[in-house]
Amino acid sequence: MKHLYAVWIKIDETLPWVELEGEYQTIREAKKTVKTVLNSAKIKFVKVSEQREHVKALITAKARR
């Protein structure tokens, strides 16, 4: 029986686990891909007013079939 590996990441405790696209034959291959993905991640800093109500960020994931 051949095993494939998927990669799940969790940014912090307030967000759910997110599965990255793709399946890998080895853990080493999966780790290499994760490093590439994390190094190319886009991060945005947004200035907000102190008067503003806090908004909870949402993530939408497409279901796999």
Image (tube, rainbow, N blue to C red):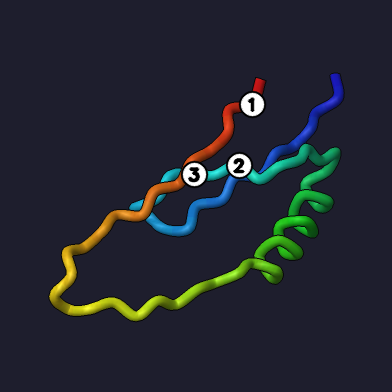
Could you tell me if the residues under marks 2 and 1 are in contact, i.e. CB atoms within 8 Å? yes
Task: Tell me the kind of residue under disc 3.
Answer: Trp
Residue at (78% x, 37% y) in the render: 23
Q: CA distance from mark 2 to mark 1?
A: 10 Å
| Amino acid beneath label 1 | Arg
Residue 26, located in which quarter of the rendered image? Answer: top right
Of labels 1 and 3, earlier in sequence is: 3
Name the side, left or right, on which 15 lies relative to 60: left
Q: Quadrant of the C terminus?
A: top right
Disc 3 on helix, strand or loop?
A: loop
Above-or-below relation of 53 to 62: below
Task: Tell me the crowding category of disc 3: few under 14, some 14 to 19, or many 20 or more residues within 10 angstroms, Cα based.
Answer: few
Q: Position of residue 45 (x, y in %)?
A: 44, 77
- Label 3: which residue? 17
Q: 38 and 45: which one is in front?
A: 45
Q: Farthest left residue?
A: 51
Percent across and percent down for residue 30 are 77, 49
- Residue depicted at 49% across the width and 44% down the height: 17
Q: What amino acid is at disc 2?
A: Glu
Which residue, given by chain and number where applicable, does mark 2 sit on?
A: 19
Spatial separation of the CA atoms under disc 1 and disc 3? 15 Å
Which is more N-terminal, label 1 or label 2?
A: 2
Residue that badge 1 annotates: 64
Which quadrant of the rendered structure holds the N terminus? top right
Q: Secondary structure at mark 2?
A: strand
Mark 2 in CB contact with mark 3 (< 8 angstroms): yes
